[in-house]
Image: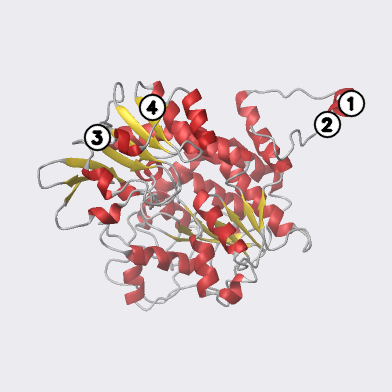
Amino acid sequence: MPSSGILKNSMNEECGPSLKKRHSIVSGRSDFWSSSDEDEGVQPHEKAIAAGQPNPPYCVRNIEQHDFGRREIEIAEQEMPGIMALRARAKDDKPLKDAKIVGCTHINAQTAVLIETLAALGATVRWAACNIYSTQNEVAAALAEAGYAIFAWRGESEEAFWWCIDQCCTPTASWQPNMILDDGGDATHLMLKKHPAAFKQIKGIVEESVTGVHRLYQLSKAGKLSVPAMNVNDSVTKTKFDNLYSCRESIIDALKRSTDLMFGGKQAAVCGYGEVGKGCCQALKALGCVVYVTEIDPICALQAAMDGFRVVKLNEVIRQVDIVITATGNKGVVTRDHMERMKNGCVVCNMGHSNTEVDVHALRTPDLMWERVRSQVDHIIWGNGKRIVLLAEGRLANLCCSSLPSFVVSVTAATQALALIELYNAPAHRYKADVYLLPKKMDEYVASLHLPTFDAHLTELTDEQAKYLGLNKVGPFKPNYYRY
């Protein structure tokens, strides 16, 4: 257990009747706290607040699940060769020594491997979830049991969501954050708004989502970004592997697990033909779906057409499609008007980070009935009996309804770790208060960490070939403007 992940706070009184004080065999302390109530309607932080514990060392659903969570993490480690190789290579150097990282991402077995890697490289972390439905409770329990400050559980209320993030961002006598690893920008914005003085002490921000990157650029344009930030979402390895290849597999998994859907012959509309949309379309087409694509960008639209997909406006096909998937990063893509005209049984889900793509708020009206039929699966029923199937209340379907391929997350985790190391150790003059892309050399290094899994052998340039191309023999091999 990495000592950098251990919190030394202690608690002297219980947080309420459904919270258990227990002795940790790992640390010899009796200050772990969690809710023993598995009902998602019970919010563990409410018990902590009621007990007068403003700064608990962690807050999870049920720490008794930690053994199961640890096995999940161990399984993920076997399929995450890149981040494990980085851990092995850099653990002696401790490139993140004294780094205090606020993390706000999905909390699952794969993220746990990243968290424990950062700790092995010298960092102390405090971590919250970026999505109220994607946390694996047993994994959060395993991390808390190992001594990490984890504040997350599946089914957080909106108020609990922000409370958890604030537990990580709020500076105290023993906790002065100096790095942020964000997925969606929520930790960045909360800290900037609520703790502006502490925000100015941040050495760097690493952001991995389209939504979060967009918010960073808005801050930069408005002159409100006072620290450097690294956009890893648009790094080649993240864009291609996490977005395209991961979504190509996980969209089918999410739909199958939640709806038992048969894809052959179904008609599907995919809104957005970026990397996520491309992956979804490839998977649906391979299983026999008739796939329509909606796009605002003529280049992406032409790509879709050349790949064999009909490019349409959603209104043109909304009455006939069986599945609607959003993947745009925008808001109001699927409206109440669209859903009024959908056929009975149409499945609606979102594969973009933001929960604004499907106008779920417009469905919460007295004339419609919500019926929970499975975890993260709701029937929205109209007065005439028509129903649509909504997954994860419009939130990220693959993380809420299934899980991601660990190998692909290894790629993203490695880019995140390298970006944190780069920003944390960079000389003061290297990065200004702006948004930067991950250096190309790091992109290539991340890819190289994963090649041994496939027994892949790179060809090496001769001196003459390198001179002819004007390249260094060890890279980078492509200019920044190259389109992979």
Circle 1: element type:
helix
Q: Amino acid at mark 4?
A: Leu
Circle 4: element type:
helix
Image quadrant containing the N terminus: bottom right
Image quadrant containing the C terminus: top right
Circle 2 packing at 10 Å, graded few (<14), some (14-19), many (20+), is: some
Residue 133 in the image: state x and y as whole percent.
36, 52
Residue linked to disc 2: 473
* Residue that appears at 28% across and 46% down: 376
Circle 3: element type:
loop
Give the label on residue 319, or none.
Answer: 3
Q: Are marks 4 and 3 in contact (CB under 8 Å)?
A: no
Above or below, 329 relative to 278: below
Q: CA distance from mark 1 to mark 4?
A: 46 Å
Residue linked to disc 4: 284
Q: In front of the other: label 4 or label 3?
A: 3
Q: Amino acid at mark 3?
A: Arg
Q: Amino acid at mark 1?
A: Asp
Q: Are marks 2 and 1 in contact (CB under 8 Å)?
A: yes
Above or below, 95 relative to 240: below
Residue furthest out toward the left: 384
* Residue that appears at 30% across and 27% down: 267
**Could you tell which of marks 2 and 3 lies nearer the N-terminus?**
3
Q: Does residue 265 appear to the left or right of 152 in the view shown?
A: left
Q: In front of the other: label 1 or label 4?
A: 4
Q: Does residue 201 appear to the left or right of 26 in the view shown?
A: right
Where, by quadrant of the figure, is residue 350 drawn?
top left
Circle 4 packing at 10 Å, graded few (<14), some (14-19), many (20+), is: many
Q: CA distance from mark 2 to mark 1?
A: 7 Å
